[in-house]
Image (cartoon, grey):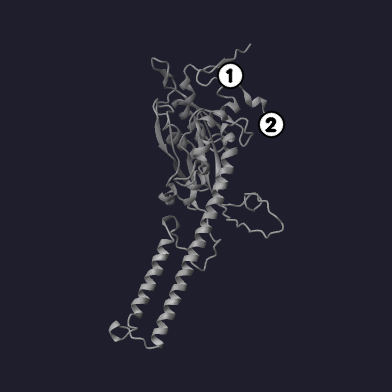
Amino acid sequence: MIIIKILNTVGQPSEVTLYHPDDLLWFVNFDKTQHKLSSAGPKGGPQAQWYHNPSFSRCGDRVVKNDRHITGVYATNPLEVLPPLYIFDTKAKSESNFHIDPEWCRDLPVVAGKYGTGKKMRYPSFVAMRPKGSMDNTLYPVFLNEVILKCYPNVQKETVRDKTGCKIKGPVLFKCDTGPGRLCKTIEHVESHKELLQKGVHNLLGLPNGTESQQELDQAFAEFKPATNKSTVRIAAMKMARRVKARKLMKKKQNEERAAAALMEEINDNNIPNNEEDGDNGGAIAALEEYIKEGDADSDDDGNEEDDFTFEVKDSVCNVKVNATDLSAIVNGFPGDPIELRPFDRIFTRKNIWSWWCKVGFIPMNRNALNDEKV
């Protein structure tokens, strides 16, 4: 007979209880997803679906296509999100030629939590570069040691608790699906897992690309992926709009230059004096210079730092690209955006994270996965 007990911290039914509420923080799930640098949908069209009145001509949405992507690796315990890892691709053959531009890292998410430290800490996002832009056998142990275990510096095989029963040292259970670095038949892989086990890191493997009923972060990606796709479409649209504005400013400047040239030609053709002392029309040149200055001032007033782009007039307004510099805006919007436009901050909240773990039923141990219609 199974006795159903209640977790003291959250009041969720569970078939097992934890020695201390903070023991929740020593269970970690991780998964990865791709952030495509393209606004194209699965069939090559725009990702957003539009409804229109056939009586009016359509606006003709433009698609920004790019075959490259950046892999986002996300991890959570039942209450907190851990620092993400972003993996860029490269065509370089040697690691000595790998290069990550610091601009790619600007404004990436910063997370905060207690994790295995006992006090709240802040951690930035991490970045890496691999030939295919995804997790592999070489990167996986580095990811565990340099990202995950940074949040659990006191990991070890045996559990140590303080007077209140709070776990201050002990093992970490790492829950993930199978894949490169997690399940392979090389001797290096076996030795790597032995080293992790000696440290107190236990890998619990699930089905690769299986149903979301088994993996907590698949619950997150169901909402997070569409939100980042919308961000990509938004970025492409903003770049097109800025290109249009830049072209308008350039066109205005060209018209002003033509008008100034025409005025100068008229002055020369009519032999108008170029000095105020030579006649009544001597101030024409001064007026022309003032006219040009006013035009420059108008151009300066129309722009700001966000619109400071060096687009060439000959380029199409739709000839824009989404690249690695836009990663932070894809995953978490722009600084100052409302929370609705910041996918990472809006979705990876304490409440949402706990709901994902409850739906799977590993912690708390309610085995909800068995109730999923796909199982």
In the rendered image, residue 33, in percent from the top left (x then y), is placed at: 56, 41
Q: Nearer the viewer, residue 59 or 122?
A: 59
Q: Amino acid at mark 2?
A: Lys
Q: Position of residue 191 (x, y in %)?
A: 48, 32
Mark before the other along the chain sequence, 2 or 1: 1
Report the quarter where the N terminus lies: top right
How far is the residue under mark 2 from the one under mark 1?
23 Å
Instruction: Give the residue displayed 41% in from the left and 65% down from the top.
Output: 298
Residue kind at label 1, given as amino acid type: Pro
- Is 1 left or right of 313, judged from the image as shown? right
**Under tag 2, what secondary structure?**
loop
- Give the quarter of the figure containing the C terminus: top right
In terms of depth relative to the viewer, which is nearer, 63 or 324? 63
Residue behind mark 2: 374
* Secondary-structure class at tag 1: strand
Note whether residue 153 is visible: yes
Within 10 Å of the Cα at label 1, are there few (<14), some (14-19), or many (20+) other Cα atoms?
A: some
Residue shown at 41%/69% (left/top)?
295
